Image (tube, grey):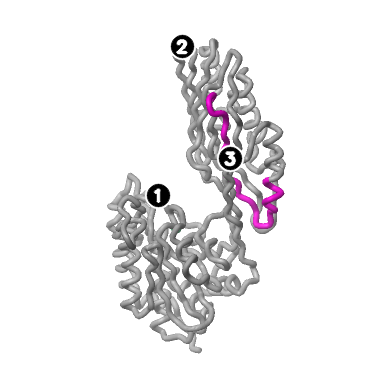
Amino acid sequence: MKNINWMQEVEKRKEALIADTQQFLRIKSMLKEEEKSDGAPFGEGIAKALAFMLEKGEQDGFTSKNLEGYAGHLEMGKGEELLGILCHVDVVPEGAGWTSDPYSAEIRNGNIYARGAIDDKGPTMAAYYAMKIVKELDLPLNKRVRMILGTDEESQWRCVDHYFAHEEMPTMGFAPDADFPIINAEKGICNLYLTQEAKAADGETILKELTSGRRLNMVPDVAKAVVQSKDAQEIAKRFERYVQDREGKVSVEGEMAVLELRGISAHGSTPEKGENAGLCLAAFLKHEKLDAAGAAFVEFTIQSFENDTRGKNLGIQYNDDITGDLTVNVGLLSYTEAEGGKLGLNIRYPVTTNLQETLAALEQSAGAHGFCMKDMSDSRPHHVDKDHVLIRTLQRVYEEQTGEEATLLSIGGGTYARSLKAGVAFGPLFPGKEELAHQKDEYIEIEDLLKATAIYAQAIYELAK
Ligand SMILES: [Zn+2]
């Protein structure tokens, strides 16, 4: 077999690759369920983006399939085994503050700017051209190669649920939807609630309500509490001193003091990077003489989570060499006098964790304070062994193409690759590059788009030959 210069093959197709990427980015493919129709369960834009890729594939001689608009695929090659490349055509809403129209795909300073440029339409087009190159070079393959196009990655993954209920699971595969070099381990993600029953309040100072956080996978950055007391003015003064070094405000009306403060948001997989506004407010309330139920809520909250994002206080700390520490984010704190208390936890656990034991320990710690565990949902950890042929091959290809070491990464969890049985996240963001997915002025560097295409082309060939 002669040596193929993959980058040269990409360069030959550079103009078309850039033009196709721009055209693809100009389709506004965000979720619009109110627009859904037959064959377009997530709205017109997403259906259009899916059709765009499938039509392109048909023109280039791939076989294509559209699964009622939930997902689709493009396939080439022959063989028992199947190599999967998992991409998605949906994007998050563009938001405000863009320098250029987020759907113009304008090129400035060698970058293509658009919603979806790096997540995930740019990489989707790179992977598509990679398949196209392998096809046009007419290289012998003994696996089938299939690009799977998801449509609901940014919301509920209903696309892959539907897809894999009807289609075969690839033998192995990769998702160009995160970082280079290779993410082969992702923690498990467990969401649950700890609830406390409401009790009639007694005492001089009553915690009427406390609210903080909207999503379990984010560190809450605002918190608000309402306290009723004859000493409302005194409480307000103490609170003002407490929030001297942070952002906060208080207002008093009669016996009601409304306390508000700001923290710092962070992703639920890295709670230590944030400052949990709800915990911060609870820490203040701990020193006030609250009614019994309010005090119990605040006390349990502080005792369990203050200065501890690793589950130590709850007795559920754990750590392994593959994925590091178990983390706990208190994404939601809510208490009302009428309904009682509720804490929403986002727990990210290492791949070797015994989840049953962890949950039993948690239930026990919470139970000792009168809290019950409710509405647990779990997404299992994801791990492909470092010696798997998939990993070995991708490492070799990455090192050949970039001259850099292909270290294996483990993360707090949640890449699209976890919907494959033996799948890893493989690019498109190169180490040290700015990450602008989901933000304004999202872009992909054209140089990186080309480089990723060359890497994917060689990877597809090496894995399927
Ligand atoms: Zn994505």
Residue name at image x 31 percent, y 77 percent: 59
State the CA–CA distance, disc 3 to disc 2. Answer: 34 Å
Residue type (three-letter) at the residue carrying disc 2 = Gly
Give residue 6's quadrant in the image.
bottom left
- In the image, 259 versus 40, the foreground residue is 40
Given this view, does label 3 or label 2 mark the residue nearer the observer? 3
Q: Which residue is mark 3?
A: 193
Give residue 343's quadrant in the image.
top right
- In the image, 101 versus 422, the foreground residue is 422
- The answer to which of marks 3 and 2 sits earlier in the sequence is 3
| Extent of the magenta region | 337-359
Task: Say what secondary structure mark 2 lies in.
Answer: loop
Task: Say what secondary structure mark 1 lies in.
Answer: loop
Residue name at image x 42 percent, y 57 percent: 152
Q: Is residue 114 visible?
A: no
Question: Is 210 placed left or right of 66 in the picture?
Answer: right
| Whether residue 60 is situated above or below residue 349 in the rendered picture | below
Q: Which residue is mark 2?
A: 254
Q: Which residue is mark 1?
A: 439
